[in-house]
């Protein structure tokens, strides 16, 4: 009877560990996307939305590899004297019954003359 309890407790501990590790990876992904948008908005404030998108895409390519950037879309636009960079991403959960993590982030920078 003790071995069955040990197996159940071990399985639950592993599920908790994988869930927490997945949350840490999602937080890293959010930080990487936020950094890419901030750098893109800064570049776009000087050179326009095209430079914003190119810079943000390059930073994402450097920071997020593999399947983490599969569900990511980045857009940049000039709005009322500012450059706005937006991203939408979906990170898949590692545990089968857990839903995917959806992220929407926005960054702004004042356009320079």
Image (spheres, rainbow, N blue to C red):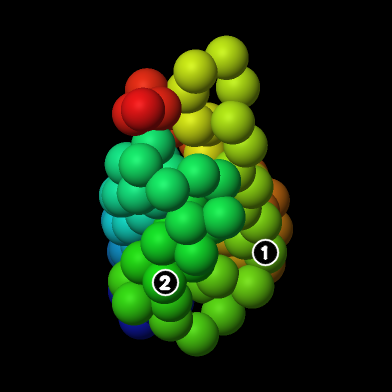
Element carrying mark 1: loop
Residue sitting farthest toward the bottom: 66
Tell me where residue 93 appears, x and y as whole percent.
Answer: 58, 62
Task: Report the front residue among 30 and 53.
Answer: 53
At 47% across and 56% down in the image, what residue appears?
51
In the image, is residue 87 above or below residue 16? above
Q: In this rendering, does residue 74 appear at all?
A: yes
Which quarter of the figure has residue 98?
bottom right
Callouts 2 and 1 close, C-beta under 8 Å? no
Element carrying mark 2: helix
Tell me where residue 94 appears, x and y as whole percent.
Answer: 55, 69
Taking the image as shown, residue 113 lies to the left or right of residue 88, namely: left
In the image, is residue 76 above or below residue 14? above
Determine which residue is flagged by label 2.
58
Determine which residue is flagged by label 1.
71
Task: Report the front residue among 49 and 58.
Answer: 49
At 50% across and 85% down in the image, what residue appears?
66
Tally the numbered discs.
2
At 49% across and 18% down in the image, what residue appears?
81
In the image, is residue 63 above or below residue 12? below
Between tags 2 and 1, which lies in front? 2
Task: Report the front residue among 8 and 41.
Answer: 41
In the image, is residue 87 above or below residue 105? below
């Amino acid at each position: 009877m003790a071995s069955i309890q040990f197996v159940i407790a071990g399985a639950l501990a592993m599920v908790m560990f994988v869930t927490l590790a997945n949350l840490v990876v999602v937080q890293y992904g959010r930080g990487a996307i936020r950094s890419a948008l901030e750098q893109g908005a800064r570049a776009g404030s000087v050179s326009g939305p095209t430079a914003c998108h190119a810079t943000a895409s390059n930073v994402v390519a450097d920071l997020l590899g593999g399947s983490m950037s599969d569900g990511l879309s980045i857009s940049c636009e000039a709005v009322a004297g500012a450059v706005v960079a937006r991203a939408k991403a979906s990170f898949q959960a590692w545990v089968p019954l857990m839903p995917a993590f959806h992220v929407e982030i926005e960054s702004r920078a004042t356009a320079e003359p």
